[in-house]
Image: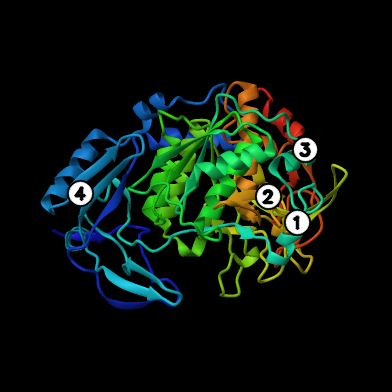
Amino acid sequence: MALQPLRGSERKPLPGARPTGKTDPNERFEVSVLLKRQSSDVLSEHVARLARGQRAERPMTRDDFARQFSAHPDHFATIRKFATAYGLTVAREHAARRTVVLSGTAAQFSKAFGVELQRFEVPGGISYRGRVGAVQLPDELQPIVDGILGLDNRPQAKPHFRARPRAGAAAAPRDGTGSFTPPQLAALYNFPPAGGQGQTIAIVELGGGYNAGDVSAYFAELGIPAPTVLTVPVDGSNNQPTGDPNGPDGEVELDIEVAGAIAPSATIAVYFAPNTDAGFLDAVTTAVHDTVNKPSVVSISWGQAESQWTQQAMTAMDQAFQDAAALGVTICVASGDNGSSDGVGDGSDHVDFPASSGFALACGGTSLQASNGQITSETVWNNGANGGATGGGVSAVFALPPYQQNLQVTSANGNATPLANRGVPDVSGDADPVTGYVVRVDGSDTVIGGTSAVAPLWAGLIACINATRGSPVGLVQPLLYQAANAFNPVTQGNNGDFVATAGWNACTGLGSPNGTAIAAALSAPAGP
């Protein structure tokens, strides 16, 4: 059977990785096949109108979406036939997510997709199953498949949180002058009253876990009701605390506690998935298309430089965010903690994905000082090469969205040029670990920063606004870019190669939120 490369599926080894031999042919794992949607042109035009600010009166329901834009039943049948021919098993399939999960051995997958699977090792102890080159598909699958994810199980994303340096943490006051509790930040940012009744905030996690006792103790210390927290397993992952507060547990409990403190009446649904491209995508699509919990906002604090993704994976994630826009689901994503390079050591500028999708609300970071309940200073978060800095810059992948037309980006040498592609971030909030968030992780109070904290901060704000409006705001960027007065401008500092300026900038976006003004801007009537 003739095989042809699947466009955008090319993989390279991780930097510094060396092959150590072929994958055990009997190793069993799962692979996600992403099928093309029906009526894709119709959906694309619909979300394009949303991006231009032409808001629908009500978002599409998940049932209506499934009827119109699921993968075609015949395409599922074709994949089942293909799987049978190679001895693969269909483990799960979901029409609205357009996903078929296949189970089999390395030998079976290698033959089915024309790849050689090897083991790779990276300095630092990372070992993964990988491939080099493109996935191969037979002619009958080329017209119906958008992506094949999971053959390679390298860690796809990193959590974007940073613990406060120990010397600073020991002296961190809880009075809003050094570190801050989320309610203190909500007050400084003039958020509307805490709420979120009837809303579900989805949180995507790619490792670690939370302890119910930590959550209960934390909210008891704050003196506010603890939110309902649910665990949603994806692709075999679950809530599995490691006991290491500096590991992924720090991300998980930070996200829950920040979002929950801002919107304590909301339900927090935590979608745990493997840290692979397949797991990440499956977590997002599971949340977006969840007909049980029905999230109205998704918080994502994991990502990686665009250059470390395959095109097929970025396209698939961007399409999932478009699904979310049609369904009225807001996607809040951390913009990264490694400045304008995004941690890539090639001397060039990079932005973090999935924050760089034009359908994500990219959340950057500031350093915040306050006194007597008022903000006294807010600048770009940049603590140097080892202390972290807010991610931001210009995408090398995604086109300029309509809501960012006619903007400029200013480099560190003072040159201002027209923004040519998607600019990151859109918005910002306190992220400096020195002025960070007081949270409880693995039994102890600690202070954490990073843009990881900003995504759930904004997710909580959006959930409160949704509850007050009685309907979800969905794709918020077009309205936010028309509401400059709803932000605290951040015009001092840089993230490496970009500097903050008045208006939008590639360090802090539009600025940090004036929550009450944001709520008013997002409550504007729907356009034509």
Residues packed near mark 4 inside 10 Å, few (<14), some (14 to 19) or many (20 plus)? few
Tell me the residue that label 1 is attached to.
Answer: 172
Task: Estimate the x, y position of residue 144 in percent, counting from the top left.
Answer: 28, 45
Cβ–Cβ under 8 Å for marks 3 and 1: no
The label nearer to you, 3 versus 2, is 2
Residue under numbered circle 4: 140
Where residue 196 sits: x, y (%)? 61, 28
Identify which amino acid the numbered label 3 is placed on. Ala
* Image quarter hosting the C terminus: top right
Q: Residue at x 66, y 71 (%)?
A: 386
| First-in-chain label (2 vs 4) | 4
Identify the amino acid type marked 4.
Glu
Q: Position of residue 337 (x, y in %)?
A: 62, 60
Q: CA distance from mark 3 to mark 1?
A: 19 Å
> Which tag, 4 or 3, sits closer to the chain's start?
4
Mark 3 Cα shell of 10 Å, populated few (<14), some (14-19), many (≥20): some
Residue at the image position 41 percent from the left and 36 percent from the top: 41
- Which secondary structure lies at badge 3? helix
